[in-house]
Image: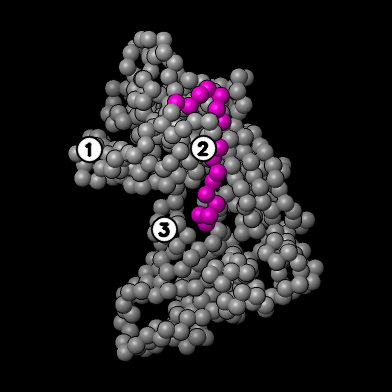
């Protein structure tokens, strides 16, 4: 565990001294055995299920999985999604501490397996390519003061994490598992917030939350204020310009944003358990314009993805690249060999060394998940707010656990009362409880590997 200390003074002043607590009390670790090694692999899913209220038990056996939105207030806005699950334990070691999984690339490849036909005209229509993120504000009515114009045609195809409810998890939810509660077609909530497996993002508390209705959904029985849900990846394809129709058979690639510590952490924890789940989603609207027909290109066409059951086009493929930091420390300096070779290219460094001269030892950088060769990437805390209710901010790294403690003498430490949140990518904020400042006190942020 490493930590940074901030001294809070009496009401007459605040010390600006900010430094590392160099006492390292150990890194949370698990006996890994001979798990060290690089991995670079491609995997097909063991399950791919069309998540749609009316899939009637065929969601796991269909050759294609459409993804589309419904703006009918009786349904989730993200009405039809595509759930994918992989078992990774055959190619990547499991049961290692999540912080020991170093990820270089996580890429999903999907192929457009079908296009649509307007039954009124016989015209084949395609969805429009949009390679960029669209804010939820672009879906709000023009009359809404928060409305934002969509600057490009079409809607992006997006990847998110997966959350579960009603006792299900990534292992227990299979292609045969129920979609969730589906009400009568005459009801005013046929399927809103009831699916057992849902696209999810991390909220400011670091919890996975359902985003089925984040663009705004309301009716007599349900109200969901809109909020931003940043995708973990936006699909990209070649040979098509933004705003053009996407040809049948085109492959989309989705590179997960591993610079986001929470996304990287999600993947690492999944690899540690041997099971990774992702959700494909799109807010391309489904619009019925003729009985049994589909909408025209710009207003109702939506993607349809080949599944592993499709015989016409390739099914989903996941590419994983990285390595697991093994337990070997051949020079007994407290630094794993794999980490030293990754960061330095040799085993010449020692735990107490500080090659980037940022005040943090190599052992501290290993524990905190920071780069020992970059002085700009070091665990620091900054203070804002009044002394009676201090607010600390610090950058986070994947699969690290942060705790704030207080002391009046730098000898005895106890948990500090406050709230930890994650207001933006890679940043944590801790806001302490209100208390009078009658004597000097110290706050410490400690870091340990998950």
> Is residue 83 visible in the rendered structure shown here?
no
- The x and y percentages for residue 381 are 46, 73
Assess disc 3: are there few (<14), some (14-19) or many (≥20) residues with their C-alpha within 10 Å of its C-alpha: few
- Magenta stretch contains residue 280: no
For mark 1, what is the residue? Answer: 142
Left or right: 325 as drawn, with respect to 197: right
Marks 3 & 1, CB-CB < 8 Å contact: no
- Magenta stretch contains residue 254: yes
Q: Earlier in the sequence, mark 3 or mark 2?
A: 2
Task: Name the disc covering residue 424, or none.
Answer: 3
Looking at the figure, which quarter contains the C terminus?
A: bottom right
Assess disc 1: are there few (<14), some (14-19) or many (≥20) residues with their C-alpha within 10 Å of its C-alpha: few
Task: Name the disc covering residue 394, or none.
Answer: none
Residue mark closest to the camera, 3 vs 1: 1
> Is residue 139 visible in the rendered structure shown here?
yes
Magenta-colored span? 245-262
- The x and y percentages for residue 69 are 38, 31
């Amino acid at each position: 565990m490493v930590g940074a200390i901030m001294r809070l003074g009496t009401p007459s002043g605040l010390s600006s001294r900010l430094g590392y607590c160099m006492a390292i009390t150990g890194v949370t670790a698990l006996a890994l055995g001979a798990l060290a090694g690089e991995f670079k692999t491609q995997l097909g899913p063991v399950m791919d299920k069309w998540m749609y209220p009316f899939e009637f038990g065929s969601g796991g056996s269909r050759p294609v999985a459409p993804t589309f939105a419904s703006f009918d207030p009786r349904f989730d806005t993200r009405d039809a999604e595509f759930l994918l699950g992989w078992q990774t334990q055959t190619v990547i070691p499991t049961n290692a501490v999540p912080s020991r999984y170093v990820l270089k690339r996580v890429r999903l490849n999907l192929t457009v397996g079908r296009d649509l036909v307007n039954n009124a005209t016989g015209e084949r229509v395609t969805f429009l390519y949009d390679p960029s993120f669209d804010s939820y504000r672009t879906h709000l009515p023009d009359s809404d003061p928060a409305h934002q114009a969509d600057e490009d045609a079409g809607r992006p195809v997006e990847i998110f994490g997966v959350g579960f409810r009603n006792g299900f998890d990534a292992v227990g939810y299979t292609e045969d598992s129920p979609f969730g509660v589906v009400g009568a077609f005459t009801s005013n909530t046929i399927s809103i917030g009831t699916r057992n497996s849902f696209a999810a993002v991390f909220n400011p508390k670091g919890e996975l939350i359902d985003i089925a209705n984040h663009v705004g959904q309301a009716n007599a029985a349900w109200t969901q204020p809109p909020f931003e849900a940043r995708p973990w990846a936006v699909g990209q394809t070649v040979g098509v310009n933004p705003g053009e129709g996407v040809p049948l058979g085109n492959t989309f690639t989705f590179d997960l944003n591993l610079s986001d510590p929470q996304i990287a952490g999600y993947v690492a924890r999944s690899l540690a358990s041997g099971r990774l789940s992702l959700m494909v989603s799109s807010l391309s609207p489904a619009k019925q314009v003729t009985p049994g027909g589909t909408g025209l290109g710009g207003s109702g066409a939506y993607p349809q993805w080949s599944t592993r059951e499709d015989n016409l086009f390739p099914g989903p493929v996941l590419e994983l690249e990285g390595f697991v930091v093994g337990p070997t420390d051949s020079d007994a300096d407290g630094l794993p060999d794999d980490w030293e070779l990754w960061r330095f290219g040799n085993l010449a460094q020692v735990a107490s060394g500080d090659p980037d001269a940022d005040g943090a030892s190599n052992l501290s950088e290993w524990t905190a998940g920071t780069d020992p060769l970059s002085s700009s990437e070091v665990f620091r805390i900054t203070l804002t707010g009044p002394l009676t209710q201090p607010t600390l901010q610090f950058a986070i790294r994947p699969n690290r656990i942060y705790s704030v403690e207080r002391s009046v003498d730098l000898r005895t430490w106890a948990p500090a009362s406050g709230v930890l949140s994650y207001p933006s990518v890679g940043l944590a904020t801790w806001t302490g409880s209100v208390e009078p400042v009658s004597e000097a006190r110290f706050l410490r942020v400690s870091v340990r590997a998950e």
